[in-house]
Amino acid sequence: MLKKAKEFATEAIDTVAEKANKAYHLVKENPKCKECTTKAKETASDVVEKAGEALEEGGW
């Protein structure tokens, strides 16, 4: 059960990071979107980092 939870959490983290990175690269050249996209990518990176820390603290 714990292994499944770890796999699910890891997959979710990877998906968030991948989607945020793709979105950033799609619209980064548009000046109207650049600020929001940069902030969204930073926020997604923060979420991924915090989730990774939580996994480590949980012994995963």
Image (tube, rainbow, N blue to C red):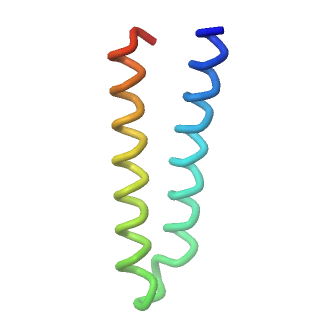
User: In the image, is 42 to the left or to the right of 26?
Assistant: left
Quarter holding residue 31 = bottom left
Left/right placement of residue 53 relative to residue 23 reads left
Residue drawn at the location 45% of the way across and 12% of the way down: 60
For residue 30, above or below residue 24: below
Q: For the point 37% across and 25% down, which residue is it?
A: 54
Q: Nearer the viewer, residue 21 or 15?
A: 15
Residue 17 image offset from top left, x and y in percent: 51, 47
Residue sitting at the far front: 1
Q: Which quadrant: the N terminus?
A: top right
Q: Residue at x 35, y 79 (%)?
A: 35
Where residue 15 sits: x, y (%)? Answer: 60, 44
Quadrant in the picture for residue 55: top left
Q: x%, y% of residue 33?
A: 45, 83
Number of numbered discs on residues: 0
Please determine whether, in this image, residue 23 is positioned above or below residue 47. below
Which residue does the image show at 41% across and 33% down from the upper left? 51
